[in-house]
Image (tube, grey):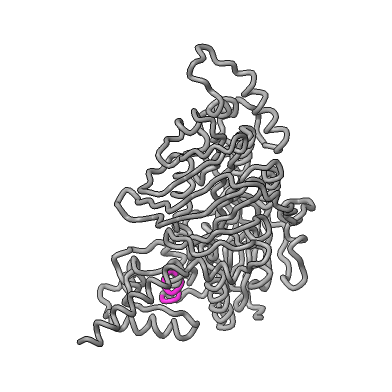
Amino acid sequence: MSTSVALDIVGVSKSFGSVIANNNVNLQVRHGEILSVLGENGSGKTTLMNMISGIYFPDKGHIFVDGEEVVIRSPKDAFKYKIGMIHQHFKLVDVFSAAENIVLGINDEKYNIKDVNNRVLEISEKYGFNIDPQKKIYEMSVSEKQTVEIIKVLYRGANILILDEPTAVLTPQEIDKLFAVLKRMRDDGKAIIIITHKLNEVMSVSDRVAVLRKGEHIATVETAQTSENQLTEMMVGKKISLNINRSESLDLDERLVVSGLNCCDEYGVKVLSDVSFSVRGGEIFGIAGIAGSGQRELLEAIAGLQHTDGGEIAFINPDDAERIDLRTKTAAEIRELGVRLSFVPEDRLGMGLVGNMDAVDNMMLRGYEKSHVFVNRVPPKKLADDIIDKLQVVTPGTSTPVRRLSGGNVQKLLVGREMAMAPKVFMAAYPVRGLDINTSYTIYNLLTQQKETGTAVIFVGEDLDVLIDLCDRIMVLDSGKVTGIVDARSTTKEELGRLMVKASSTEENEDITKEGGADDEK
């Protein structure tokens, strides 16, 4: 590994009003190394990277590139100093080809698209990418789109690359390929910074790890000389357990049965195709899949929030074994039937809680009775106090609007409220997305507690390690189709990864077969 410093951050600070995002941060990344940047949600990771890439300008401090002080006021300035950032949310034009997106925004008045294609292929061959420069973005997988973003900054000469959560939407196989490419780039002398929250990936790919906490740089350590537990302690400031204590499934009767479910979006595109599965009381049923594979629509359909086009969603009442079809009923009608079903949606402040309302009012959203002329605020106030105490919600008080709370504290309120309803079916869509490690493990333990009461728990997650450790069974969705239901205790990330692209791969092979047959006939 080179000892030549590519990027040197010295005493950099940034505030937004009274909020200090970064406070006197010192950080170095060398040529020929991969540096992981770790920190809890709100630790200042993204703000720091945005200053390096020209999106924000520091209030004070200095930035040096290859030993020379630079001033970066825009992404254009960052490119001038050979700094390129690959954002988690891609910035590509769908109707353009890969090559057209790669040269988009370059000031050269003219370019020869053939020369661009050849240069893209040269970069791909050098680092091990697999990309067709003439392929349209809308025809690409998530992994291919990410490849285009990386090649775009390499094409413009970047020697310092910043990747923000690069593995969030990739399968295990795609992650392995990405890491192999990054290591080739490192060996070529590139300085690479990765922002991630997955400790196993940090240990796998990085040479050093920088830890931020509450806007300050805590330490930078050699990856080979640290551990996941030590890194977690540095991030949080105290020792926490990273173990998920999965209890045995109670193996109760079926609580929810979904049969032949179909669903189209507002444009008429099918997002769920003949989905069938069942969930038992006393188990955690995981749902895995690449983002946008139908997970959200499935949970909303069960909750009565999504129109469906056929099939059955049956709730089996554990008290009298009555079978109730929920498919054609609204959320209000489901409640009126006495079906105890709780839903923690992906959009916590859009669908889960009302940001301008305080904790007490948000508790009342689930317990309010239309027939009451006067509203009794004592029970919801007690519920809010109990949740704040039990889940250690950090808030000035129950009268504070929830929009003023951090994402983790908002999520604790939402999960606590839904669990307080004593549901027979509890559904959670990405309940730890954007949350710090400590809060995430609190949520995992709460889901296990629900399971132990005999509740049927449906958990949609994106971290395959967590799905395997937390759940009893895992269903995989790809392009709205069920590609497999496996025992979490015996499956592997590799098996889940293959199932996550099984349906789309089959469709591609069928298309190739059809095209080949047509050519043969010609």
Residue at the spot 44% in from the left edge and 82% down from the top edge: 124
Q: Is residue 72 visible?
A: no
Q: In this view, does 348 lie to the left or right of 123?
A: right
Magenta span: 148-155
Q: In this view, does 236 lie to the left or right of 138?
A: right
Q: Is residue 63 visible?
A: yes
Magenta region's main secondary structure? helix
Instruction: Kindly indicate the quadrant of the structure image that contains residue 64.
Output: bottom right
Residue 427 within the segment the image draws in magenta: no
Expressed as whole percent of the image width and height from the top left, the position of residue 5 reads 62, 74
Q: Is residue 423 above or below residue 458?
A: above
Residue at far top of view: 373
Residue at far right of view: 239
Residue at the spot 67% in from the left edge and 24% down from the top edge: 382
Expressed as whole percent of the image width and height from the top left, the position of residue 294 reads 44, 55
Q: In this view, does 245 lie above or below 64?
A: above
**Image quadrant occupied by the C terminus:** bottom left
Residue toward you, 444 or 96: 444
Residue toward you, 342 or 377: 342
Residue toward you, 417 or 303: 303
**Image quadrant occupied by the N terminus:** bottom right
Residue at the spot 41% in from the left edge and 49% down from the top edge: 311
Expressed as whole percent of the image width and height from the top left, the position of residue 205 reads 63, 73
Residue toward you, 6 or 127: 127
Residue 150 within the segment the image draws in magenta: yes
- How many marks the image carries: the answer is 0
Residue at the spot 41% in from the left edge and 55% down from the top edge: 272
